[in-house]
Image (spheres, rainbow, N blue to C red):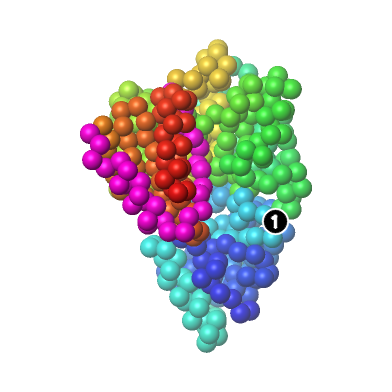
Amino acid sequence: MTADLSQIVKAYDVRGVVPDQWDESLAELFGAAFTEVTGATAIVVGHDMRPSSPGLSRAFARGAAYRGADVTEIGLCSTDQLYYASGALNLPGAMFTASHNPAQYNGIKMCRAGAAPVGQDTGLSQIRELVEKWLASGAPEPVAEPGNLATRETLEDYAAHLRSLVDLTAIRPLKVVVDAGNGMGGHTVPTVFAGLPLTLVPMYFELDGTFPNHEANPLDPANLVDLQKRVPAEGADLGIAFDGDADRCFVVDEHGDPVSPSAVTALVAARELARNGGKGTIIHNLITSRTVPEVVRENGGAPVRTRVGHSFIKAEMARTGAIFGGEHSAHYYFRDFWNADTGMLAALHILAALGGQDGPLSTLVAQYDRYTGSGEINSTVADQTARLAAIRAAYEGRADVTLDDLDGLTVAAADWWFNVRPSNTEPLLRLNAEAEDEATMTRIRDEALAIIRA
């Protein structure tokens, strides 16, 4: 096919509409290029429940085999299950998923052996260049001895590994509602939760890549509504929602109120520090709540602040030897999971923490939710640079304020902060604000928005 790879090769993955932007013939070229760039003699490949995923995945495997790599196909899996396979088998891997995107999309998340990320700076740009070359001149001939394709089941081993990292055997019985959004959580949750003292109330566990009930994107509050109603109706202790490829988890308490990902990050950080003798580095991006570094220090750890984006988190995890990292977007990264992100392991930590004491989840997480946040507010602007300069001019020189440029512009005072970041793909500025109380947060948020939207 004729393809514009600039439209589908993103910063961290490949993603686009099937078959309009890419198809199985292109997937085969990506498999060949992935094998060339990584130098792999063997790889592992998995896919989600989208209608186009099995064909794309098999085409990628075929392309890799043509370049001499043996391919282990693990079939239906969550993204973190693919990372498990890459780590446990020590093989480069490829996951076919478009995560929370609508049904007509699909994509490839690629990693090197041990689940090390492949992004623009770590091989993805070279993969794109090879595919573009072959689109222009024709694919290379298969090698004299193509690799073999074999299948392997990894779900039970993946579940056992996660349960080995969090002990849930002694918790009090809990009732948990899980909304899988017709995504891969419906495949993994029953096996991971099997035998634990949990009463599971499943919602939308049927694997259906057309997403008939709601988008599998819990970051959008509209997609949490069903879960928020169901938890109190069932008298459940909590609710958990997974995105389409089940690598992110979102939590609601017994009232159906969302628990902020920053509070989850702080709670899991405290548990991971306790598991590591009260020592260790914890990574958090710069728009997580101030609660996170406070809790880390209170529990003996060293917080490290990073830019937004999983490539930055993973790079800092590797550089510092961090034991855990968390993002506002509900991605949670664990040293004991090859520095990769797994929503399922974060969910097990929440269940263990809740079941290890007698109080409700709302009370438990209150200590990890100390400030009032605005959430992310997007504004369309004609000139991102000019608006950032206007914000800088309004605040620099004030004795009570500090400014930093780690990612966009962060303006901070003793009892509040806000960050404004430009989108890399759209003419947007993204504002996040936080303060010690609602009134202060509202004032700071509105001051910043007035400058951004002037």
Residue 262: within the magenta?
no
Tell me the quarter of the image containing the N terminus.
Answer: bottom right
Instruction: Between residue 149 and residue 315, name the one nearer to us.
Output: 315
Secondary element type, mark 1: loop
Does residue 133 appear left or right of residue 73 in this picture? left
Res 159 → quadrant: top right
Q: How many labels does the image show?
A: 1
Does residue 316 appear left or right of residue 19 in this picture? left
The residue pinned by badge 1 equals 103
Question: Residue at image x 55%, y 29%?
Answer: 259
Pinpoint residue 33: horizontal percent, then vertical percent. 49, 72
Res 321 → quadrant: top left
Instruction: Between residue 84 and residue 201, name the one nearer to us.
Output: 201
Q: Give the range drawn in magenta.
A: 370-399
Three-letter amino acid code of the residue under disc 1: Ala
Pinpoint residue 169: horizontal percent, then vertical percent. 56, 23
Pinpoint residue 149: horizontal percent, then vertical percent. 60, 66
Sort mark 1 into few (<14), some (14-19) or many (20+) by Cα contacts within 10 Å: many
Is residue 294 shown to the viewer in this render?
Answer: yes
Question: Residue at image x 57%, y 38%?
Answer: 249
Question: Residue at image x 73%, y 49%?
Answer: 211
Question: Residue at image x 70%, y 56%?
Answer: 103
Q: In this view, does 337 lie above or below 382?
A: above
Residue 381: within the magenta?
yes
Looking at the image, which residue sits at the far top? 358
Does residue 259 appear left or right of residue 228 in this picture? left
Is residue 355 shown to the viewer in this render?
Answer: no
